[in-house]
Image (cartoon, rainbow, N blue to C red):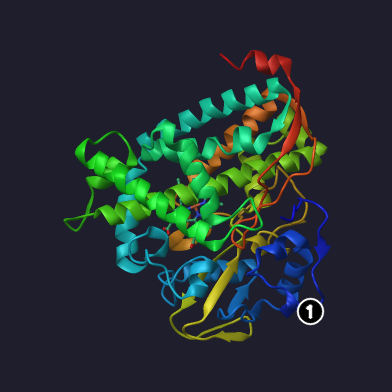
């Protein structure tokens, strides 16, 4: 098994078409910044050649183009998948049932039902839980002094958050965490695709059982709200609910976890920015937005064209797969001043980390709460953080980030004294 680290990556090859965006290794072995700069400047609509028998696809890298295509659910569809693995396989079995891969009126109706389940009351309850958890876990980690922030803090908070929202019993959190990790990306380079497939099936089975339990004995949680919901008088089926629980747990866990890990890693390398956060010369809100732009954990999402689309000097043909690169759009120099500089006070900061338009992330509020509470607890309980080893990067063509983060915290004793109050 190859061990990849966060640092020490090579420049991408000169020849754009030699860069294979399907292969997770590409992101581990190369520093992609130069590639995206070149694409934005000279190839804003790039045709990625077919690899391994899968079809080729379009790569869209400029902020304005990515926004325009996210917004356009008339000429583009999500129903043939919204991530590379399903798009290139030609479809998603949850199409028309799972929110992210549903379009048109059904998407609007389903989104309204889900938004009701995310009521301000449900969200404020979960947000309070996030604050308590983040403060407790980070205070404990700082008191311990050294440890793996990914394992000890960042992997617990998001799952507790979405688990709390859905009503997943705490005893099952660790089991689900293992499954979500195998489903989307992998900590290991050599994980077989069947493992991801099996993990996804196990998540679906798990939620089938939980939905049956909630139908019999409703509680104050999202699953119970969904079991009582209907669209035009037709109740949601068990399968509708199970697919959407699956999407919430996958959508809400890894993305937030990777953002928290990336934020701490970045702060360990940016003493000036840490100082601004610690001293309160930037607001927690602006620091959170910049942490989200900086991390951009979901590198890309995709669509399939329903008709021919002219853009950026080229033609996307009906039936073609189009990928929208958040990772590039969030560094677009025509939108962000000094995009490769971390500025916790950045304003405006209209990053595209949560997508845009009709499929804009349903969990954006909760994700923001998680990152904000993590940053707040860090600046309250710690005087700084330093790396004690090389972090490991995940293996994925969808997500980016690290699966381990060995660190040492410098305690802020006055702050820690307030931890239990
Ligand atoms: C959609 C990113 C956290 C649930 C999306 C999309 C992006 C995204 C880019 C758009 C996908 C598309 O257009 O095809 C993120 C990031 C997060 C995060 C970066 C954390 C930093 C969450 C959380 C939840 C969640 C915490 C659940 C509690 C969803 C759902 C959708 C979605 C259900 C589909 C919305 C729709 O299709 O209408 N997310 N997400 N996400 N996200 Fe998130």
- Assign a secondary structure to mark 1: loop
Residue 399 drawn above or below residue 345: below
Quarter the C terminus occupies: top right
Residue at 64%, 58% in the rendered image: 190
The answer to which of 290 and 92 lies nearer the viewer is: 92
Q: Which quadrant of the figure contains the N terminus?
A: bottom right
Q: Is residue 110 above or below residue 376?
A: below
On screen, residue 415 above or below 321: above
Instruction: Name the side, left or right, on which 151 lies relative to 174.
Output: right
State the image coordinates of residue 95 (x, y, percent, origin top left).
Answer: 37, 66
Query: In front: 188, or 315?
Result: 188
In the image, is the residue at mark 1 within 8 Å of ligand 1 by its beta carbon? no
State the image coordinates of residue 329 (x, y, percent, origin top left): 65, 63
Say left or right for 196 vs 139. Answer: left
Q: Residue at x 49, y 74 (%)?
A: 89
Q: Residue at x 67, y 64 (%)?
A: 328
Residue at the image position 55 percent from the left and 75 percent from the top:
322
Give residue 56's quadrant in the image.
bottom right
Q: Is residue 1 visible?
A: yes
Q: What percent of the width, then of the height, locates residue 194? A: 51, 61
Residue 115 at least partly seen? no
Pick whichever, 290 or 53, lies toward us.
53
Report which residue position mark 1 lands on: 15
Above or below — where is 18 with respect to 389?
Answer: below
Relative to 270, 400 lies left or right: left
Q: Is the residue marked by circle 1 packed among few (<14), some (14-19), or many (20+) residues within 10 Å?
A: few
Residue 249's x, y, as percent? 45, 47
């Amino acid at each position: 098994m190859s061990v990849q680290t966060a640092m020490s990556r090579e420049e991408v090859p000169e020849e754009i078409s030699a860069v294979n965006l399907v292969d997770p290794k590409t992101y581990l072995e190369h520093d992609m910044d130069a590639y995206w700069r070149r694409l934005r400047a000279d190839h804003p609509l790039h045709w990625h050649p077919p690899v391994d028998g899968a079809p080729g696809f379009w790569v869209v890298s400029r902020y304005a183009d990515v926004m325009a295509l996210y917004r356009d659910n008339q000429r583009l569809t999500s129903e043939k998948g919204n991530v590379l693995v399903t798009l290139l396989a030609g479809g998603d079995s949850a199409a028309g049932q799972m929110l992210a891969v549903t379009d048109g009126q059904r998407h609007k109706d389903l989104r309204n039902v889900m938004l009701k389940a995310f009521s301000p009351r449900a969200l404020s309850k979960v947000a309070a839980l996030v604050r308590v958890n983040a403060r407790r876990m980070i205070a404990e980690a700082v008191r311990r002094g050294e440890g793996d922030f990914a394992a000890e803090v960042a992997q617990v908070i998001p799952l507790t958050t979405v688990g709390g929202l859905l009503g997943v019993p705490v005893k099952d959190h660790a089991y689900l965490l293992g499954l979500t990790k195998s489903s989307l990306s992998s900590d290991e380079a050599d994980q077989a695709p069947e493992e991801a497939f099996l993990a996804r099936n196990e998540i679906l089975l798990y939620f089938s059982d939980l939905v049956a339990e909630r139908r019999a004995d409703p509680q104050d949680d999202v699953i119970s709200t969904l079991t009582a919901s209907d669209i035009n008088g037709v109740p949601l089926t068990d399968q509708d609910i199970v697919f959407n629980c699956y999407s919430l747990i996958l959508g809400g866990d890894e993305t937030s976890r990777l953002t928290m890990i990336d934020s701490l890693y970045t702060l360990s390398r940016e003493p000036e920015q840490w100082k601004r956060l610690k001293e309160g010369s930037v607001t927690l809100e602006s620091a959170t937005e910049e942490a989200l732009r900086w991390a951009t954990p979901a590198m890309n999402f995709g669509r399939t064209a329903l008709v021919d689309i002219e853009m950026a000097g080229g033609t996307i043909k009906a039936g073609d797969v189009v990928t929208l690169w958040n990772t590039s759009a969030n560094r677009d120099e025509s939108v962000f001043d000094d995009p490769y500089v971390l500025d916790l006070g950045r304003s405006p900061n209209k990053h595209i980390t949560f997508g845009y338009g009709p499929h804009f992330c349903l969990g954006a509020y909760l994700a923001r709460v998680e990152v904000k509470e993590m940053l707040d607890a860090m600046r309250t309980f710690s005087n700084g953080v330093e790396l004690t080893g090389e972090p490991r990067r995940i293996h994925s063509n969808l997500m980016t980030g690290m699966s381990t983060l060995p660190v040492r915290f410098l305690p802020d004793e006055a702050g820690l004294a307030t931890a239990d109050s």
